[in-house]
């Protein structure tokens, strides 16, 4: 009854590799079930975000699950793993528990102390519960992780002045373009990140926001909340003629903007500069777009310099965070030791 984490993140792989191993929200429920069956796992949970793909698993007694999980990833994503062996990290038992506590509290994030990851872990946990792929161990572990994250958020200043991926994207836009109040911005994707983008844009004085999403109901909620303009997903390419900034964060499994789309667009724009910030993993915008004159494409890894500015602000809080994690870790490991004795 060993606990294992295997994964990749922004520290071990760039976005062009992370996207190869990512799972879309629509895939997660089914993939949790298939992974459990194919890899002979007692319990499992998949966490797939823009910055990480991790699999949390409880091994069936006497079975080492690392090989089967890697084989599953290879088959599912149609990838040969020979070239990717060095990007994976593996944690077992106590180290795996400690890793999850750090992840959920935002201490392992690109942005130290960011709050988005806690919600993403909760969604991954809810999906795994719905898939019936978790059990006593992972249920207890993740509930403990959420309590630990809440305590860190309450008892420390780790989140003070925090920048999220969404706010970092807006900072990048301001760094490039200066004040944003007179800019027309198109947000593609009306999920959590899309909503945060709209909020930060409004705070920075942007009046003209367009929102496109495959599901119109979600886009409508966002546009009503922020007085934005709804654009159907089929229509958004036509609206690119008039916008200054495009920020994408969809869950599409393939590019939604390709080089030929932008090449066709630019004459209609009379070569007016177009700034695109792609926050999606897999990426929404074809990499070749960046080679087009007067088009400036940035992806989530390009936010790193903006993000590094927040690290020094939080280092003083890390010792307190580590002490809280150590207490939570001791508590969980004590409970788990009793469970192992009971099952022996």
Image: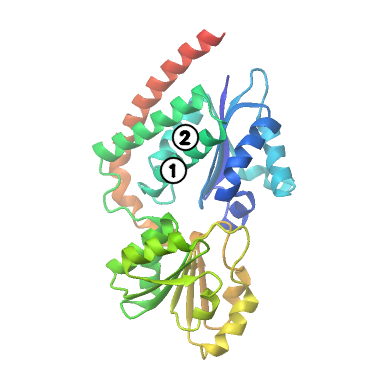
Image check: 61 left or right of 315?
right
How many neighbours does mark 2 have within 10 angstroms: few (below 14), some (14-19), or many (20 or more)? some
Per the image, the residue denoted by label 1 is 108
Which one is in front, 122 or 29?
29
In the image, residue 296 sits, relative to residue 88, either above or below, namely below
Residue at x-position 63% and y-position 27%: 41
Mark-to-mark CA distance, 1 and 2: 8 Å
Residue 160 visible to the viewer: yes
Do labels 1 and 2 touch, CB within 8 Å? Answer: yes
Per the image, the residue denoted by label 2 is 99
Residue at x-position 50% and y-position 30%: 96
| Secondary element at image label 2 | helix
Which one is in front, 225 or 71?
225
Residue at x-position 28% and y-position 73%: 205
In the image, residue 213 sits, relative to residue 88, either above or below, namely below
In the image, residue 105 sits, relative to residue 116, either above or below, namely above
| Secondary element at image label 1 | loop
Mark 1 vs 2, N-terminal side: 2
Residue 23 visible to the viewer: no
Q: Point out residue 169 in the picture as x, y percentages from the top left corner.
A: 41, 64
In the image, residue 65 sits, relative to residue 185, either above or below, namely above
């Amino acid at each position: 009854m060993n606990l294992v984490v295997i994964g990749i993140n922004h520290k071990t792989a760039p976005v062009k590799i992370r996207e190869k191993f990512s799972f879309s929200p629509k895939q997660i429920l089914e993939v949790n079930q298939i992974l459990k069956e194919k890899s002979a796992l007692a319990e499992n949970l998949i966490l797939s975000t823009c910055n990480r793909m991790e699999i949390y698993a409880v091994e069936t007694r006497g079975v080492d699950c690392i090989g089967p999980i890697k084989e599953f990833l290879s088959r599912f994503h149609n990838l040969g793993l020979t070239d990717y062996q060095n990007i994976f990290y593996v944690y077992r038992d106590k180290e795996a528990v400690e890793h999850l506590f750090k992840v959920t509290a935002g201490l392992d994030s690109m942005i130290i102390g960011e709050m988005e990851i806690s919600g993403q872990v909760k969604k991954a946990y809810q999906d795994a519960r719905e898939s019936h792929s978790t059990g006593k161990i992972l249920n207890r572990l993740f509930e403990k992780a959420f309590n630990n994250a809440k305590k860190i958020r309450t008892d420390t200043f780790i989140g003070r002045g925090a920048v999220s991926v969404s706010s970092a994207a807006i900072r990048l836009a301001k760094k490039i373009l200066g004040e944003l109040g007179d800019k027309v911005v198109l947000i593609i994707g009306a999920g959590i990140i899309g909503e945060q983008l709209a909020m930060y844009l409004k705070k920075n004085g942007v009046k003209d926001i367009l929102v496109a999403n495959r599901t119109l109901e979600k886009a409508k909620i966002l546009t009503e909340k922020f007085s934005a303009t709804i654009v159907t997903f089929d229509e958004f390419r036509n609206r690119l003629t008039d916008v200054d900034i495009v920020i994408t964060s969809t869950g599409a499994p393939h590019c939604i903007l390709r080089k030929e789309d932008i090449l066709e667009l630019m004459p209609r724009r009379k070569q007016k500069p177009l700034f695109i910030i792609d926050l999606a993993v897999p990426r929404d915008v074809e990499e070749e777009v960046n080679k087009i004159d007067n088009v400036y494409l940035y992806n989530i890894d390009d936010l790193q310099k903006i993000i590094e500015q927040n690290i020094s602000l939080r280092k003083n809080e890390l010792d307190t965070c580590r002490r809280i994690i150590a207490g939570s870790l001791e508590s969980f490991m004590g409970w788990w030791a009793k469970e192992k004795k009971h099952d022996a």
